[in-house]
Image (cartoon, rainbow, N blue to C red):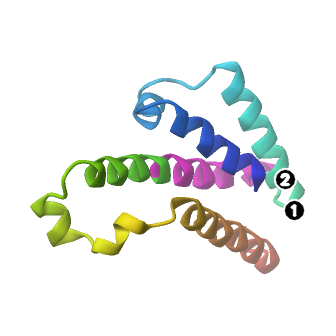
């Protein structure tokens, strides 16, 4: 789990990093290292190697979209609250603990992986 938390932290350091990753083939050394470690982590969970990439995509997309949303909401509430945010989003979002919610979502995904593995429906 630490691997994915660190990946999120690295993405947060670079403004619009998620948009950049959507536009380029991520073949730079840090990404390749992350990918290899993530695939190893997933395989060690007992996932058949032929399905590891599918599981990786789920986690990778979760991290990307979470960071994208985190940046969006942080920007939205750092500026003066707009009418749009008042209408569509709970005001409590301003006090949202992004770290806690990220870990919660990651745990849900990993628990789902374990559940899928134990059902053996590949």
Whether pointer 1 and pointer 2 mark residues with C-beta atoms closer than 8 Å, the reply is: yes
Secondary structure under the numbered disc 2 in the rendered image: helix
Quadrant in which the N terminus appears? bottom right
Q: Position of residue 68 (x, y in %)?
A: 42, 46
Q: Position of residue 92 (x, y in %)?
A: 35, 74
Q: Residue at x 76, y 52 (%)?
A: 2
Please, which residue is most extreme toward the left here?
A: 83
User: Which numbered disc covers residue 46?
Assistant: 1
Residue 46 sits in quarter? bottom right
Give the overall secondary structure of the magenta segment: helix
Q: Residue at x 20, y 70 (%)?
A: 88
Q: Which residues are magenta?
A: 49-65
Residue 38 sits in quarter? top right
Decide which of 17, 32 is in the foreground and name it: 17
How busy is the neighbourhood of tag 1: few (under 14 within 10 Å), some, or many (20 plus)?
Answer: few
39 to the left or right of 78: right
Provide the residue designation for mark 2. Answer: 43
How busy is the neighbourhood of tag 2: few (under 14 within 10 Å), some, or many (20 plus)?
Answer: some
User: Which numbered disc covers residue 7?
Assistant: none
């Amino acid at each position: 789990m630490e691997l994915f938390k660190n990946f999120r932290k690295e993405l947060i350091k670079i403004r619009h990093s998620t948009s950049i990753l959507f536009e380029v083939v991520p073949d730079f050394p840090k990404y390749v290292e992350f990918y290899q470690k993530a695939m190893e982590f997933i395989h060690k969970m007992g996932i058949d190697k032929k399905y590891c990439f599918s599981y990786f995509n789920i986690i990778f997309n979760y991290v990307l979209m979470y960071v994208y949303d985190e940046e969006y909401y942080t920007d939205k509430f750092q500026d003066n609250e707009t009418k749009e945010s008042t209408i569509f989003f709970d005001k409590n979002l301003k006090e949202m603990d992004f770290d806690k919610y990220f870990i919660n979502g990651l745990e849900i995904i990993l628990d789902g992986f374990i559940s899928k593995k134990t059902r053996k429906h590949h």
